Amino acid sequence: MQDEYITAFSNAVVETREDTGIELPDFVEQYVILLLASRTKQQHFLPKTTFAETFLSLETKKQAKDLGDTCLFVTGVFPEYGISIDYYSTIGKNSYRQVATCYNPELFDTLSNHFDYVRFFINCIKDKRDKYIV
């Protein structure tokens, strides 16, 4: 089933790029596709505590990556959720910044530095999701 989601989000990314003119590096587009495909059917993806408490208690780079991914997903797909986009965006940027220090610096520096741009792109994709997901 995940392959179907990857194909669907790949199509949505291409259409969004063509419709909006927003361009992301290929490696960021691929990351966004995999993030959306992996979270589409996931029911429990929010932290057990607040986002801030979760950030302050990060112990591993994987936890930081997961929190950054959650922040990117929430702000892109559910921009009206919770406290404010700035709150989740700040936590997401800083989470990705922690990951970039030792794992794939190009990707995670890009996600950290251009979080809001990527979030906006995901928000544009969100509107196409139902068209592709059957």
Image (tube, rainbow, N blue to C red):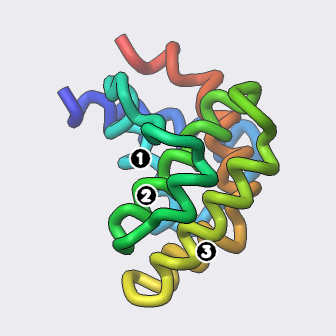
- Residue at 48%, 88% in the rendered image: 101
Q: Please, what secondary structure does the residue beneath circle 2 have?
A: helix
The numbered disc on residue 35 is 1
Residue 128 image offset from top left, x and y in percent:
58, 23
Residues tagged 3 and 2 counted as in contact (Cβ below 8 A): no
Q: Quadrant of the C terminus?
A: top left
Q: Amino acid at mark 3?
A: Thr
| Most foreground residue, 71 or 52 | 52
- Residue holding disc 3: 110
Disc nearer the start of the sequence (3/1)? 1
Q: Please, what secondary structure does the residue beneath circle 3 have?
A: helix
Crowding near pointer 2: few (<14 within 10 Å), some, many (20+)?
Answer: some
- Residue at 71%, 66% in the rendered image: 114
The numbered disc on residue 31 is 2
Q: Amino acid at mark 1?
A: Leu
Q: Quadrant of the N terminus?
A: top left
In the rendered structure, the answer to whether residue 130 lies left or right of residue 111 reads: left
Residues tagged 2 and 1 counted as in contact (Cβ below 8 A): yes
